[in-house]
Image (cartoon, helix red, strand yellow):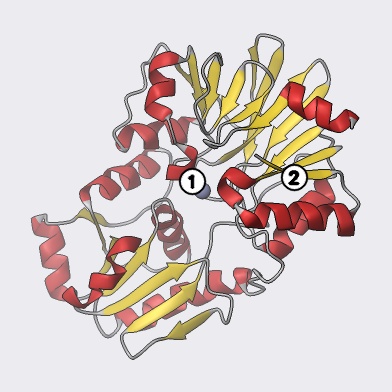
Amino acid sequence: MAAEKLLARLVAVADNGAISLGPDIVVDGHRCGAVARVTTHIHNDHTRGLSTSLRRLALHIATPLTHDLLEAMGYRVDPSRRVDVSYGAKLRIGDAMLRLLPARHVPGSAQVVVDIDGLLLGYTGDFKLPGTEPIRGAEVLVVDATYGMPEWRRPWQDEVEYLLPDLVNDALMKGPVNIYAYNGKIEEVLLLLRSHGVDAPVVAPRRKYRMLRVLEKHGYRIGDVLPEGSAEALEAERGGWVIRFRSFSEWSRRRRLAGVNVKLTGWEFQAPYRWLNTRDLVVSFSDHADFDQLVRYVAEARPRLLVVDSARGGAAARVFAEYARRRLGLQAVAAP
Ligand SMILES: [Zn+2]
């Protein structure tokens, strides 16, 4: 099939999650021989092999915010290789013209568009809607399909953005609120809470604290954020009117902290939120498109060939590719 040949020549998704857009550019994974690596955002499944790329490839490309967050996470980006690309700006690499476009996911996230002699190749990175403008007219578009199964729907996704600040504010009246979330989601949730008037001091683990300060440097309003264990943090915790951010993996040890525990998870499809008991609350909150949003995105993007990333999406990628073929009439494959 002609489209498959095109795919093999220009675009590849490797088992390690590295996405090649043309011969010189690799995204969110390492590939020997590439000239430039792009990192779309700071999540672990998009920074695989990053230390190797930072040592061996000539250029590392990201938004200025993602670069600063990566450095706060401990990556050392040699200034001679670091190329900050703001949303919409163009960068020439060999025969390719590269652009990063906004993706609503975690602060700094980007979609990648590469134009090689008028042939458009794209990768969505992780995203959700609204707030992510689809890449239209691509010859080949690689899409993330974390929630690619038709039963993975969260019709309340917008509503949760109002519900969560209310739930947190109500709980704060009784004492501390401990929020358990994955890396990256913490940044997004803090900004959401602040924009809805939740002003309680936030206590964050040291590394998180550094990352939140990076957001502040980039103009985001993070409010009162204190490093865990500091005198100010201890004082705020004694007062009880405080939000503590904890990593998702600590949920099983939540009994060690006083207050209400809130788990943020994208894998809750029954209701926007549910109380497990009087102290433990699970909120269906994701920074990824659910199935309906994925359909909306690709239906608007209508690439000539859709490649669904199965290095990250697993079995859901195959299901989604099949859906795109049958129901949306797109040429679609899952890869690898
Ligand atoms: Zn992500």
Horizontal side, residue 131 vs residue 161: left or right:
right
Give the residue drawn at x 38%, y 32%. 68
Q: Which mark is residue 267?
A: none
Classed neighbour count for the residue bearing mark 2: other residues with Cα under 10 Å, few (<14), some (14–19), many (≥20): many
Give the residue drawn at x 58%, y 57%. 288
Q: Position of residue 302 (x, y in %)?
A: 85, 44
Q: Position of residue 166 (x, y in %)?
A: 45, 78
In this orientation, which residue lies closer to the viewer: 325 or 199?
325
Q: Amino acid at mark 2?
A: Pro
- Considering only order in the chain, which callout, 1 or 2, is on the residue closer to the N terminus? 1
Q: Position of residue 214 (x, y in %)?
A: 35, 40
**Quarter-of-image position of residue 169:** bottom left
In this orientation, which residue lies closer to the viewer: 45 or 1?
1
Give the residue drawn at x 82%, y 32%. 4
Q: CA distance from mark 2 to mark 1?
A: 18 Å
Q: Is residue 100 above or below residue 297?
A: above
- For the C terminus, the quadrant is top right
Give the residue drawn at x 60%, y 52%. 314
